[in-house]
Image (spheres, helix red, strand yellow):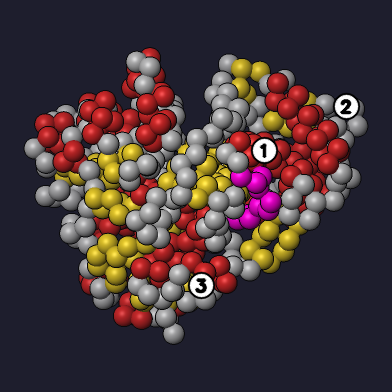
Amino acid sequence: MTYLLALDQGTSSSRSIVFDATGRILAMAQREFRQIFPQPGWVEHDADEIWDSQLATAREALAKAGLQAQQIKALGITNQRETTVLWNRKTGQPVHHAIVWQDRRAEPICAELRAQGLSGLVREKTGLVIDAYFSGSKLKWLLDHVPGARAQAERGELAFGTVDSWLMWRLSEGRIHATDVSNASRTLLFNVRSNAWDEELLALLQIPRALLPEVHPSAHVYGQAAARHLGAEIAIGGVAGDQQSALFGQACFKAGMAKNTYGTGCFMLMHTGEQFQSSANGLISTSAAQASARPEFALEGSVFIGGAVVQWLRDGLHAFSNSQEVQGLAESVPDAGGVMFVPAFTGLGAPYWQPQARGAIVGLTRGSTMAHIARAALESIAFQSAALLQAMSSDAVAAGAAPVTELRVDGGACVNNLLMQFQADLLGIPVLRPRVIETTALGAAYLAGLSTGVFKNLGDLEQHWRAERVFHPTLSRERAQGLMADWERAVRQTVTV
Ligand SMILES: Nc1ncnc2c1ncn2[C@@H]1O[C@H](COP(=O)(O)OP(=O)(O)O)[C@@H](O)[C@H]1O
Ligand SMILES: O=P(O)(O)OC[C@H](O)CO
């Protein structure tokens, strides 16, 4: 039997999963690590803790599966994206904590670039908006603020990487300094059309070329993890940012295929094939995980508060003590009774882009209960996701393609049947939940299996994808459109700060 190991380095925890060659899970291990909040709006991770927790889970997963490293054909890495690590090439030590994707400190750098009228150029080359979310601005901040860093960088003494690069560096004991196209496409420094670092963007952000990792396709043998870490050398055969990895793990390989991950936030991606497509509806364009050197693209939109609204009901309102109870509570009423909940706790993401908006619960009456609020909270996850899918379908149609015909789902909150049914009702297309909902890790395992011959081609992988349950729309389109109009009205009722 052939086995693959996926290292899934997420924002709040590191996980490792052992899969067999049919994509079945054999064992899984997970560890949380520290979130560091030095100032309001700043979020850091200790890169050593990322490495330690990731390595510990890899060892634990192998032990739980009862396997030796020699039995693993290859490992794949998937990671929280944009989080920026800067380290010393000689000592292998980070020069600063990693700056996490959620961190807003680089906003003034971005504001200056926007003021110089560079948004069009950046969008054209990278598919992105100039925002502190992306790594390039975080890297510039580090070079400007860590004493001596810029001079060291110019002398070639430092290395920059997203979390995938950092893990590969450590796994290979400094022999590999590389990343894949999907991670590179989140830096603001990478030209997604030519699949290469872009000299003009590097100059604009004052980033020395010597800092940068080599870029390869996502399915590629990057090198070997050193024997001392896992007991034997293991080939590192695949790398992708977590959202692109989930798109791959969902076998969304063709233009128009889309997935939505319902985690703390929601990330929706639609494959757009080999065609770079920019959005007229507030989405960003990004490189998809690539099985070969051929560029492939996706449109992406994110919802900041998805499953987190359930956490807020639990911890903020004490509506229940366990997240799974939300479904029972919401189902105890036939509908939300006219209550609309817009969880704009940290502003609204795509397609609204209203960073100053704050949350609102509207439509309350004397008859409203916690059950109505819980139902409205769940529905808000579906409303926000439906707005993203509408934007994607409009972009697809504008590019002469068909609208999205089905949505594949994953992430912790996709277990909620009420939410999935409401999602299908709003969208008017089937919502498909796969048997393996660990699609992020599965994508990395698939990539590693492709580069090492475990799988022949994408067709091989498509055959492994199986729906566990399909949610068919039951509402009339007229009613669904009415609900979407109610939602949009509620969005307009949010206050801004
Ligand atoms: N039964 C449920 N119904 C709705 N949401 C849920 C349910 N169980 C967990 N969640 C939500 O799912 C999220 C966790 O999903 P997960 O994919 O683990 O997130 P992340 O990868 O962002 O940490 C939490 O925000 C939690 O509130
Ligand atoms: O770690 P996650 O699953 O919250 O994903 C983070 C995203 O990659 C950020 O862009």
| Residue type at numbered disc 2 | Thr
Task: Name which quarter of the figure residue 235 lies in.
Answer: bottom left
Q: Nearer the viewer, mark 3 or mark 2?
A: 3
| Residue type at numbered disc 3 | Asp
Q: Is mark 3 within 8 Å of ligand 2?
A: no
Q: Residues within 10 Å of mark 1 (few under 14, many from 20)?
A: some
Asked whether 380 or 117 is in front, the reply is 117
Q: Which residues are magenta?
A: 401-410
In the displayed structure, 251 sits above or below 187; it is below
- The C terminus lies in which quarter of the figure? top right
Q: Which disc, if any, is residue 390?
A: 1
In the rendered image, which residue does mark 2 sit on? 365
- Let me know if residue 402 is in the magenta part: yes
Q: Earlier in the sequence, mark 1 or mark 2?
A: 2
- Residue 361 shows up from this direction: no
- Please tell me which residue is depicted at 60% across the width and 27% down the height of the picture: 352
Lateral position of residue 296 relative to residue 232, left or right: right
